[in-house]
Image: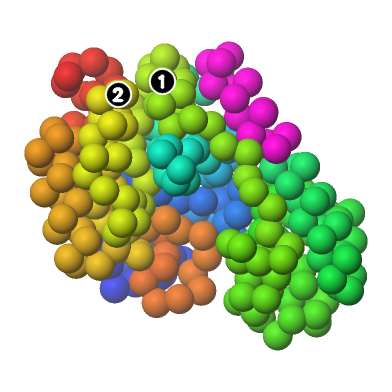
Amino acid sequence: MRRRPNNRPGKPSERSRTRQGLADLHVHTTHSDGACSPCEVVVAAARVGLSAIAITDHDTTTGLAVARPEAVHWGVELIAGVELTSEHRGREPHILGYFFREDDGPLLAALRRLCEGRAHRIEAMADRLRTLGLLVNLETVRRSYPRAVLGRRHLADYLWKTGQVSATREAFARYLGDGGPACVEKTRLDAVHAIDLIHRAGGVAALAHPPHDFGESSIRGLADAGLKAIEIEGPGCSTSLGRRLAEIAQRLELIGLSGSDFHAADRPGRWVGAIATDPEMLERLRARASGRLE
């Protein structure tokens, strides 16, 4: 279940000794659309007393190798993670993968396809912004985020920094939000295929931040395909939605996970470890991945 520490990253916690075993299982870095580097999020996890962290960048695992030496130094378990962009019944659920083999060929090939799709998408969105009268230099964007898998957040940040919008939120509201004049559809994996890829790579698949209108029948369909866990607590999850998701998880025998979905500490409650998974749920997830729990 969710635990909310009172401190932000970078400030040592007086409660850290009492929080051993907690894990933040949903963290993004500069290798996708996060504001902090892989090493920085590991340090933040250590300073708030987490025992484990899963870096779950969108459609890439490149941040794991960068973070691993730092995790060893701080004594924080680094769990192999990823967040796959997928589709299911006309929706865009995101599938989280944990404890998989990072060198698995089919999974890496799928990630390459997704990243190539993202590269084409960013170019198409830049073209649309230009036709709308905005100035966009993609080379400048790439230099600003040399390791990132570029997406809408990076374009929005560029428009703000170059003074073409007053805030990144305005960029989304006017141009880049879903249905906006510069928005381009993502390349997606079929969700059942995404789950299978993670399973064949020795990992366990979870459903990330299900929206309130993503019904139990859809979740059941993914569970029948091999989904083993579901996020029941996160930054955008209301108490009532979390309760409903927990009930669904119990009925479908899914492991209930919690994570901060950290991208940047730009709002209250949005820092590494702000929402974390209890040791019992983490061990159940580990057991699922190892085949000890079916």
Mark with earlier residue (2, 1): 1
Q: Which residue is mark 1?
A: 196
Bounds of the magenta segment: 104-117
Q: Main secondary structure of the magenta part?
A: helix
Q: Give how far apart the Cα atoms at labels 2 and 1 are.
A: 7 Å
In this view, 160 is above or below 75: below
- Residue 284 makes an appearance in the image: yes
Q: Nearer the viewer, residue 250 or 192?
A: 192
Give the quadrant of residue 58.
top right
* Residue at far front of view: 90
Query: Do callouts 2 and 1 mark residues in contact (Cβ within 8 Å)?
Result: yes
Give the quadrant of residue 168.
bottom right
Q: Amino acid at mark 2?
A: Gly
Task: Please report the residue visible at 17 percent of the width from the left and 65 percent of the height from the top.
Answer: 240
Q: Is residue 122 left or right of residue 52?
A: right
Q: Which residue is mark 2?
A: 226
Q: Secondary structure at mark 2?
A: loop
